[in-house]
Each structure stands twice: as structure tokens, then as C-alpha cells.
Image (cartoon, rainbow, N blue to C red):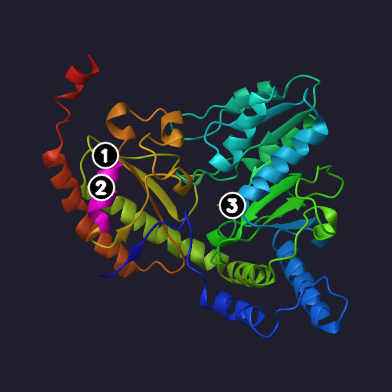
Amino acid sequence: MKTIYLDNNATTCIAPEVREAMMPFFNERYGNPSSMHFFGGRIGKDIREAREKIASFINADPSEIIFTSCGTESDNMAINGCAEVLGRNAGIITSRVEHPAVLGPCRNLKDKGHRVTEIAVNNLGQLDMEAYRDALKGDNKKLISIMWANNETGVVFPMGEIASLAKEAGAIIHTDAVQIAGKMPIDVQKMPVDMLSISGHKIHAPKGIGFLYLRRGTRLRTFMLGGHQENGRRGGTENVPYIVGFSKAIELASENMAAEDKQLAYLRDKLENGLMTTCPDARINGDTVNRLPNTTNISFEFIEGEAILYHVSDLGICASTGSACAAGSLEPSHVIRAMGVPFTAVHGSIRFSLSRYTTEAEIDYVLEKFPPVIRKLRDLSPFSKDSMPFLEV
């Protein structure tokens, strides 16, 4: 059975070039970069070169890059480390549609007594900018953590405006840029964010590597104590093969971004238009203008998303009902609920996310196989348009 993988916002395959770049560091080049001898020193040089390449990707200084294990660690480091520095009286501002890696630490800080404000979104998944401006008022210190692009809908927030308003208010701002990386240019000299998180496995690097950009002068309490690594900001021997692989993935993303974006948008639109035409009672969730080129989120009314995925999985089609970090939960997506998607559609949302390796033939296969599954499930469903008024009473 062929595999049609359309769940790339959850994770991507490792690019062959990335795998090739990593292999020497699993075998003959295994030295510890902290060692004084030449064998380790050469590895230290490889890390420096990788750090420089990654810093260049976002127009940062290499000293502002902290290697981590993933986007979740980067988010936690930014939020918890900054909150400790600012103190209990600081206000924390985030949005209701953040990834669990941001909502989790923010809500944990709320439980510990911090004042946390979660900004709502409208029915297109756009941030309520008026509420955001109101939350920025007041003289107390503030930490803001708002994602650049949503992992479930692909909706892109106006990060330039969000960051500029934060700076005017004297706030520290962090953004989870995990989904933006490799799809839109990032320039921290033009975008006044203080901290920014990126994860390798979203851009064809392996799982287990990420980084936190920390603008020079931004104070952050170290929470992983140990050796001198990462300028004393994160102890632990560096994950050398993955760092090298990450830098190669970023190199590939930089080279092909514009062409890939155009192709991804074409394939996404073909998939989206095809499904909307052949599957009645379907709706697109989110802003269809300000969004990532590779992502569409569609609700199929009157049926369960889990049932859809179960049936299409038997056909080799891999998609998602939402964030991979929430898999296993029977609750509807917090992102879809925050957008006010109707009861009839909230459980039937499916996210399709494409990558540079997605082909038009694969999209054609989905357009052939997916609609019959929707028709079959609708025939089996006890719900319908006619039954909804009765159920709502």
C-alpha cells in the first residue's frame, strides 16, 4: 500500500542531504566538542559553523542561538526563564490558539500566581488585536508569547505589528516560529522579537533538535544547569550529528523557499478546491489569505474526524485532526473551538499539511479516495441537517 503523507505540520521526513551530512558524526567523527585535543576541537569547529549558518537563516548573531532538543524545550525555556527574571508581578500575555508547548507553561505559571491573559481569535482564527492592545496597558512588566503561524489552521498572525506594539509597551516578546520556518523569511533585525523558537523536525531535520533565538541583552534564567555549553545557558554535551543535520536542513530551506512555497500553495489549493467541490457540507477553517502555503484545515459536518482518519488511513492517506501533541484526546481541537466553529463541524475537522516532497499524483489520489469515505460515513451518521435543530433543542 502506498503512503500519502499529508501530516507535515506534525513532522517531516529527514531530507537525504541532511542524513548524509549527519552520518560521519555517528561514526568516525564522534569526539566531544568540549575536549581540548584536536579530535574534539575539530567537532567544536563543526558546531561553530553550523551555528553561524543557522544564525544567518534568521539574520541573527551566532551568539544569540541556543541549541535545544526541540521547539517545546525552546518555548519552555523562553517562557519560564523570562518569567523568573521578571518576577511574580509580571503579566503574561498569550493567545487561546497556541501550541500546547506555550499554553502549558503559561497556564502552569497562572496556577503559581502569575497573571496570564489569553487573547481570543475571531471565526477566521485572526488574533483580536483590540484585546491585545488592551492587555498591553498598565505599568507592570509583561512577557508576551504569541505564535507566528498556527500549526492547525496555518493562519499567520501579524507578527510585525504584534512585536512593535509589545516594544512600545516595554514588554519582552517571544514567538513560536516553528511552523513559519522554511516557509516564510525570518529576519530578527527587522522583526523586533526578543526570543524565537524553531524546531528541526518541521523542516526535514531529525526529531530531537531545535533552537531558541535570544536577542542580545534579553535576560533569561538558565533552567538546565551543568557545563559551559551554549555560553552557560544550557548545560549538556551538544547533540553534534543533529546540530549539523539541522544546519543542512536550514541551508536547503533557504535555497528553495520561494519555489517550494509556490508549488505548495498550488497543490494545497488543488486539494482544497477538489474536496470542497466533491464533499458537500464542508467548510474551510481559518483565514484563506493570511496563511501558510502548505496547510488547509477542513471540517466535514455531521461526522467525526477520528472516523475519517481511521478509514483514509486504510487507504494509505495520513492526515490529522489537529496538533500531534494532542493526539489521543477525544476532545475537539482547542484551536477550532476558539474560532467558534459550529457544533455540527467542530468534531469533523481534518488538517492536511504538505511538504516539498508532496506530489501532484498524491493529491490526485486523495481527491479520488477521500470523497467516497465522506459519503460512506455520512450514510452511517445518525446526524444530518434535518436532525440538528432537534438536537440543539
Residue on which disc 1 sits: 304
In the image, 107: left or right of 296? right
Q: Is the residue 377 above or below the residue 138 in the image?
A: below
In the image, 360: left or right of 87? left
Report the residue at 78% width, 22% height from top: 89
Q: Measure the C-alpha gap from mark 3 to mark 1.
A: 28 Å
Q: What residue type is labelled 1?
A: Glu
Residue on which disc 3 sits: 178
The secondary element bearing badge 3 is classed as loop
- State which region is magenta: 304-313
Q: Quadrant of the C terminus?
A: top left
The secondary element bearing badge 1 is classed as loop
Q: Measure the C-alpha gap from mark 1 to mark 2.
A: 7 Å
Q: In which quarter of the image is the N terminus?
A: bottom left
Does 390 lie within the magenta span? Answer: no
Residue on which disc 2 sits: 308
Q: Where is residue 176 in the image (x, y as percent from the top left)?
A: 62, 46
Decide if residue 18 is in sight here.
yes
Q: Where is residue 87 in the image (x, y as percent from the top left)?
A: 80, 28
Nearer-N-terminus badge (3/1)? 3
